Image: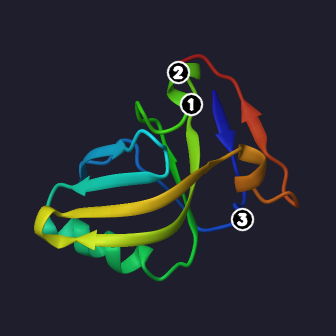
């Protein structure tokens, strides 16, 4: 299935299927996400972009980061702060997991398409 979101309430980034990200993890409280990048250039690009936004959405499918993976779904995390750890090519994000309805802009229709692959 493919779900198309024409607009989010905040800028959004998906962490899936990127060779530039080496790992993603969350703490047990679910309020901190650590994103490790494969190299300094990738880290620098992400950090310089992410720090420009007071808040943004991270879309993830990561064990231990929200309830989505157990349900076969993505999670939407509202990032409220980022802390760089350049020595480890790491960005530590303060997050809260939000429902799709809180992430997607209510003034736009969300389309859902089912196809055979």
Q: Which residue is mark 2?
A: 70
Q: Quadrant of residue 63?
A: top left
Quadrant of residue 68 within the rendered picture = top right
- The residue lying furthest to the right in this view is 107
Q: Residue at x 29, y 74 (%)?
A: 45
Bin the neighbour count of mark 3 within 10 Å (Cα to Cα): few under 14, some 14-19, many 20 and up: some
Say if 13 sits above or below 56 in the image.
Answer: above
Q: Residue at x 18, y 64 (%)?
A: 89
Distance from the alpha carbon under mark 2 to that under mark 1: 5 Å
Note whether 79 is above or below 64 in the view shown: below
Q: Identify the mark nearer the N-term, 1 or 3.
A: 3
Q: Position of residue 66 (x, y in %)?
A: 53, 37
Residue at position x 41%, y 35% in the image: 62
Residue ID for mark 1: 68
User: Where residue 92 appears, x then y in whole percent?
Assistant: 34, 62
Q: Residue furthest front?
A: 29
Disc 1 crowd, CA 10 A, few/some/many (<14, 14-19, 20+): some
Q: Is residue 114 above or below residue 88?
A: above
Q: Earlier in the sequence, mark 3 or mark 2?
A: 3
The residue that label 3 is drawn on is 9
């Amino acid at each position: 299935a493919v779900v198309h979101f024409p607009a989010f309430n905040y800028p959004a980034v998906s962490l899936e299927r990127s060779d530039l990200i080496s790992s993603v993890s969350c703490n047990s409280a679910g309020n901190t996400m650590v994103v490790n990048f494969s190299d300094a250039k990738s880290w620098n690009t992400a950090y310089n972009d992410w720090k420009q936004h007071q808040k943004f959405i991270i879309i993830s499918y990561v064990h231990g980061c929200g309830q989505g993976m157990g349900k076969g779904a993505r999670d939407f995390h509202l990032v409220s702060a980022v802390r760089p750890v350049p020595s480890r090519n790491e960005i530590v994000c303060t997050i809260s997991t939000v429902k799709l309805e809180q992430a997607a802009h209510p003034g736009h229709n969300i389309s859902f398409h089912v196809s055979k692959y």
